[in-house]
Image (cartoon, helix red, strand yellow):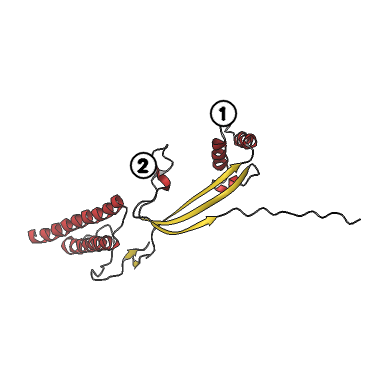
């Protein structure tokens, strides 16, 4: 019986060690912002197979089943896979898991007083007038976006003349974590990290104004 216990305890110790190695691989990717997919895959396979082996020896030794069901993964496979909702291994998505879209557009304020009045009216309609009067055109723009649909489409207004803008798409290794950023640091959410890869940039240019020529009436 002691020999049987030793097999189970050894298998359990292997599960714990594999779980620690897997966590270390995950944490390394989070701290550096660059995920080593090959290292993560190796750690995942080792943890998967360690739990498979523990369940196997547990059943042999005591007739008890482990509270999970996994399939053995060939450690020599070179194609990373992940378990689906049924626990079956399926090929992992080869594409990056996090895409960052960053946009900027500048405007000329055609009428500051009208823009501020629009923002104050929007606050009144939504019941947010208790926040007090809108104190600047910048605050007015923020209120209109916040109370609108949350996009720049909220600013398609006669009071604002759009200048040039840009949309940049990045592949990133780490998603945006707002709680880690200071509220007064407006640049940080848009700052690209060394590991971010620029996929492309779309330049937005305002459509040229169309001039309609008047024709003198024929008499």
Residue 26 in the image: state x and y as whole percent: 28, 54
Vertically, is 172 above or below 75? Answer: above
Looking at the picture, tell me which residue is in the foreground, 139 or 93. 139
Kindly indicate the quadrant of the structure image that contains residue 88: bottom left
Residue 104 in the image: state x and y as whole percent: 50, 49
Q: Give the secondary structure at mark 1.
A: loop
Spatial CA distance of label 1 from label 2 is 29 Å
Count neighbours of disc 2 (C-alpha within 10 A) and say few if under 14, some if 14 to 19, many if 20 or more: few
Vertically, is 183 above or below 39? Answer: above
Lateral position of residue 71 relative to residue 5, left or right: right
Residue 208 in the image: state x and y as whole percent: 64, 54
- Residue at 24%, 58% (x, y): give it: 66
Task: Decide which of tag 1 and tag 2 comes sooner along the chain.
Answer: 1
Name the quarter where the N terminus is drawn: bottom left
Looking at the picture, tell me which residue is in the foreground, 65 or 100. 100
Extreme residue in the right direction: 219
Residue 132 is tagged as 1
Query: Is the Cβ of the residue at disc 1 closer than 8 Å to that at disc 2?
Result: no
Name the quarter where the C terminus is drawn: bottom right
- Residue at 57%, 54% (x, y): give it: 205
Q: Give the secondary structure at mark 2.
A: helix
Count neighbours of disc 1 (C-alpha within 10 A) and say few if under 14, some if 14 to 19, many if 20 or more: few
Kindly indicate the quadrant of the structure image that contains residue 134: top right
Extreme residue in the left direction: 2
Residue 123 is tagged as none
Vertically, is 48 above or below 147? Answer: below
Residue 126 in the image: state x and y as whole percent: 60, 36
Looking at the picture, tell me which residue is in the foreground, 203 or 70. 203
Lateral position of residue 121 relative to residue 37, left or right: right
State the count of labels. 2
In the picture of the structure, the residue carrying the numbered disc 2 is 180
């Amino acid at each position: 019986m002691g020999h049987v216990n030793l097999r189970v305890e050894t298998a359990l110790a292997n599960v714990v060690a594999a779980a620690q190695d897997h966590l270390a691989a995950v944490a390394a990717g989070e701290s550096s912002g660059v995920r080593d997919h090959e290292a993560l895959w190796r750690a995942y396979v080792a943890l998967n197979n360690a739990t498979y082996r523990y369940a196997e020896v547990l059943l042999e030794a005591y007739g008890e089943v482990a509270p999970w069901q996994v399939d053995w993964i060939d450690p020599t496979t070179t194609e990373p896979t992940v378990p689906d909702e049924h626990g079956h291994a399926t090929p992992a998505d080869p594409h990056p898991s996090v895409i960052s879209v960053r946009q900027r557009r500048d405007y000329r304020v055609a009428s500051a007083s009208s823009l501020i009045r629009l923002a104050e009216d929007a606050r009144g309609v939504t019941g947010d007038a208790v926040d007090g009067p809108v104190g600047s055109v910048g605050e007015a723009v923020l209120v209109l976006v916040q109370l609108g649909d949350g996009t720049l489409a909220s600013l398609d207004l006669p009071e604002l003349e759009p200048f040039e803008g840009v949309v940049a798409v990045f592949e990133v290794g780490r998603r945006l974590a707002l709680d880690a950023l200071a509220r007064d640091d407006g640049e940080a959410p848009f700052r690209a990290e060394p590991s971010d890869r620029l996929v492309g940039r779309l330049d937005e240019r305002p459509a040229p104004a169309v001039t309609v020529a008047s024709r003198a009436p024929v008499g």
